[in-house]
Amino acid sequence: MAVQIITDSTSDLTNEELRELNVHVIRMRVIFEDGVFTDGVDMDKEQFYAKQAAASALPKTTQVNPQEYCEAFGPLLESGDEVVAVLLSSKLSGCYQSACIAKEMLEEAGERLHLVDSLNATIGEGLLVREAVRMRDAGKSAAEIAAALEDLRRRVRFLAFIGTMKYLKMGGRVSASVAALGGMLHISPVVALVEGEVKAVGKVRGREKIFSYTMDFAQHYPVDSRHCVVFGHSRCLETMEPYRDKCIQALGLRDWAQDELGPVIGTHAGPGCYGMAYIGLK
């Protein structure tokens, strides 16, 4: 009996990474004014950000319904395997609840389907998927993996710096005057995932302050070097790379990866956002 790992596309793993890690994916859909697009199928991240820039209203992401989860889980269970599903935070979407309903609908689920509310999104969720893969490859059972992830998720630290306030203004999260002033002064809002929700936790001015803020954050929440650190960005690789390299050197990181933020965080953050996710010692 093998252990199968499945996640939703909000974990922002690339198609190549999904193949390399042998992870199955449930695709989310993105709603723009002119139609509905499936994340990673008929709209990739480059297309998403280009379309977002031209849109007059913020796009939305749709909730995966229970039947869709049944269709994703069913074939894996019918093969006789165990399944661990690492899913988008229940505080950000109703997807996890839909998955719970699907589990009740699937007679063959029994004790072989384990649903994990990641309490994370994007690179934080992707970090937990990588941990699930590591444990699967080490021979852990689905139950052991799910239990470990439910412990680790509370120690995931996600920190990101917003490059533009345009989309926060469009979503009504900041006023037009605050957005304009922030742009003139090069102020970057700081967001973190706190108890499964995206929260504004501060603001910084300039790239050196961003790095200093990160080091202060990592001092308060020390990195557990036994686990991977994931860096993320939204259409700003050239800005994120120097930040990433300085963090790797300053924190002595040996195991790291990077991905691009997709529609869930990207809808509100827009391009120019970057940061990191890691598992803390506390």
Image: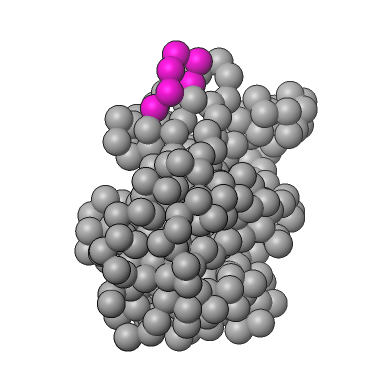
Q: Specify the principal SS of the magenta part.
A: strand
Is any atom of residue 199 visible in this view? yes
Residue 212 in sight: no
Q: Looking at this rendering, what residue extends furthest in the front direction? A: 107
Residue 31 in the image: above or below residue 125: above
Residue at 45% in and 58% down: 107
Q: Which residues are magenta?
A: 32-37
Q: Position of residue 267 (x, y in %)?
A: 54, 35
Image side of residue 228 versus residue 178, left or right: left
Image quarter in which the C terminus is found? bottom right
Q: Report whether 88 appears left or right of 91.
A: left
The answer to which quarter of the image holds residue 179 is: top right
- Residue 8: give x, y in percent of width and height: 43, 51
Q: Residue at x 63, y 41 (%)?
A: 186
Quick one: 139 or 260, which is closer to the camera?
139
Does the magenta segment cover residue 28? Answer: no
Q: Position of residue 200 (x, y in %)?
A: 72, 50
- Say which quarter of the image contains residue 132: bottom left
The residue nearer to you, when weighing 14 against 134, is: 134
87 vs 280, nearest the viewer: 87
Where, quadrant-wise, is the N terminus in this rendering?
bottom left
Tell me the residue at 77%/28% (across/down).
175
Q: Position of residue 168 (x, y in %)?
A: 66, 33
Q: Is residue 107 above or below residue 83?
A: above
